[in-house]
Amino acid sequence: MQPNAAFWREQLNLTPHVEGGAFRETYRSDWMLDMSTLPAGMAGNRNASTCIYFLLEYGQFSAFHRIAADEIWHFYDGQTLTIYEIAPGGELKTHKLGRDVVNGDQLQIVITAGNWFASRVEVLGGFALTGCTVAPGFDFADFELAEKAPLQAAYPEHTALIDSLTR
């Protein structure tokens, strides 16, 4: 049997994520980092690292959002996940997270802290099972979900992409 999205959602006990898709936190470090050692923009102490499973299916998208820490994405199963990253100066990077490394996919990618990013599976009927590791650890206090109009105003060169990947 070839595992599909429903298989992974059930086996890994994934639940809906606010940005889209499904997830489950699998690790939260017991080590705490004092806010005095953290970059500006993080209000409070943070766990040293966190990790989740993240599942996205064709027709769904992870809406543009940003966090205050670097996020490392890992590919596990399914089809290529396209991740769009917009740097503060407007530079758009398109990452292909997947196993087809001969054709440019990467098994891991890093999204830079503070950059806007969104993702989707572009293979009809496909899914992508991935993992995300954040250090310093993820905290919803550092999470910002993009609003369409302000993000388009900030990056008018990416208006169509932003329109398709915001709610």
Image: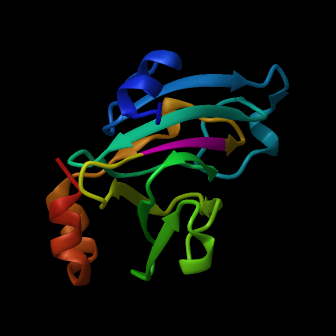
Which x, y percent locates residue 149? 14, 61
Which residue sits at x=79%, y=40%? 36
Between residue 109 and residue 142, name the one nearer to us.
Answer: 109
Which x, y percent locates residue 108? 66, 59
Which x, y percent locates residue 22? 39, 30
Residue 116: quadrant of the picture: bottom left
In the displayed structure, does residue 112 sit left or right of residue 45? left
Which residue sits at x=70%, y=52%? 39
Which x, y percent locates residue 78? 47, 47
Which residue sits at x=71%, y=23%? 28
Q: Of helix, strand and loop, which mostly describes the magenta segment? A: strand
- Residue most toward the right? 31
Which residue sits at x=16%, y=73%? 160
Confirm whether residue 87 shows in the render.
no
Q: How many marks?
A: 0
Between residue 136 and residue 36, name the one nearer to us.
Answer: 136
Q: How is the image coloured?
A: rainbow
| Residue 124 vertical placement versus 29 (above, below) | below
In the displayed structure, does residue 75 sit left or right of residue 18? right
| Residue 24 vertical placement versus 107 (above, below) | above
In the displayed structure, does residue 105 sit left or right of residue 94? right
**Extent of the magenta region:** 128-133
Residue 125 among those drawn in magenta = no
Between residue 93 and residue 53, name the one nearer to us.
Answer: 53
| Residue 14 vertical placement versus 97 (above, below) | above
Residue 129 among those drawn in magenta = yes
Confirm whether residue 76 shows in the render.
yes
Residue 143: quadrant of the picture: top left
